[in-house]
Amino acid sequence: MSILRTARSIVAFLAFGAVVGAGAPDCGAATEPERRARVEEYELKAVFLFNFARFVDWPAESFAAPASPLVIGILGEDPFGPGLDAVLANEDVGNRKLSVRRFASLDQLEPCHILFVSPSEAGRLDQVIARLGKRSTLTVGDTKEFTARSGMIGFETVHNRLRLRINLAAARAARLTISSQLLRQARIVETERAR
């Protein structure tokens, strides 16, 4: 394991105590410290996405071939900017390279293994979940009701600290196995309805 990967892993799992910019306003109206806090928040979330790829198992049929890349998708407005690409550059999980794809709208959505649903798509979350159906796609978001509405992993900020909520039933319905190491760091929540 590379030193960089080890550092990122440590950061990700110690990040529950990291201070992040909670709910910084849109960058256009934000002050410089608010913009910087928002960038730092999404850099931290990018590291989490990398670690989700390491601590979740997908069914073999989720990949076209044994060395097919693990695809991380972003649906809607991209809050990560180049930060996610920088975190994933030259990284792999097992024998799989990591690839990032951005989808401006639900109509453009293609198969991916992890899908970050941007806050810009919060009003369409039910449509996103329905579109994915029974695909083995780990859904991640940071809107308040994300996991209660069948999203799988939700970020939440509590007392200026980043926490995870996991909807384990939704993950199991998609045939995903989440490592106990990740589950121990999260709050397990129930869904409003079965996926």
Image (cartoon, grey):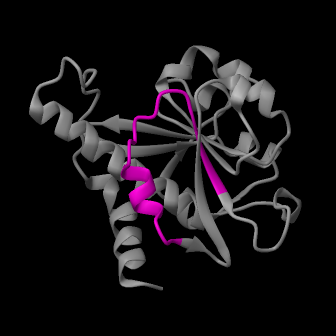
Q: Position of residue 72 (x, y in %)?
A: 60, 50
Q: Look at 76% across and 24% down and name the residue there.
A: 193
Compared with residue 60, is residue 101 higher up or lower down, i.e. above or below?
Answer: above
Compared with residue 54, is residue 173 higher up or lower down, i.e. above or below?
Answer: above
Q: Is residue 192 visible?
A: no
Residue in the foreground of this view, choosing between 93 and 176: 93
* 77 in magenta: yes
* 74 in magenta: yes
Residue in the foreground of this view, choosing between 14 and 130: 130
Q: Look at 19% across and 17% down and name the residue there.
A: 29
Q: Residue furthest right?
A: 61
Residue in the foreground of this view, choosing between 57 and 121: 121
Q: Position of residue 83 (x, y in %)?
A: 36, 51
Residue 168 as seen in the image, left or right of residue 175: left
Q: Position of residue 47 (x, y in %)?
A: 42, 58
Q: Which residues are magenta?
A: 71-91
Compared with residue 158, is residue 70 higher up or lower down, i.e. above or below?
Answer: below
Q: Is residue 42 visible?
A: yes
Q: Look at 11% across and 26% down and name the residue there.
A: 31
Q: How many marks?
A: 0
Q: Position of residue 103 (x, y in %)?
A: 61, 33
- State which quarter of the image contains the C terminus: top right
Q: Look at 83% across and 57% down and name the residue there.
A: 62
Q: Quadrant of residue 55?
A: bottom right
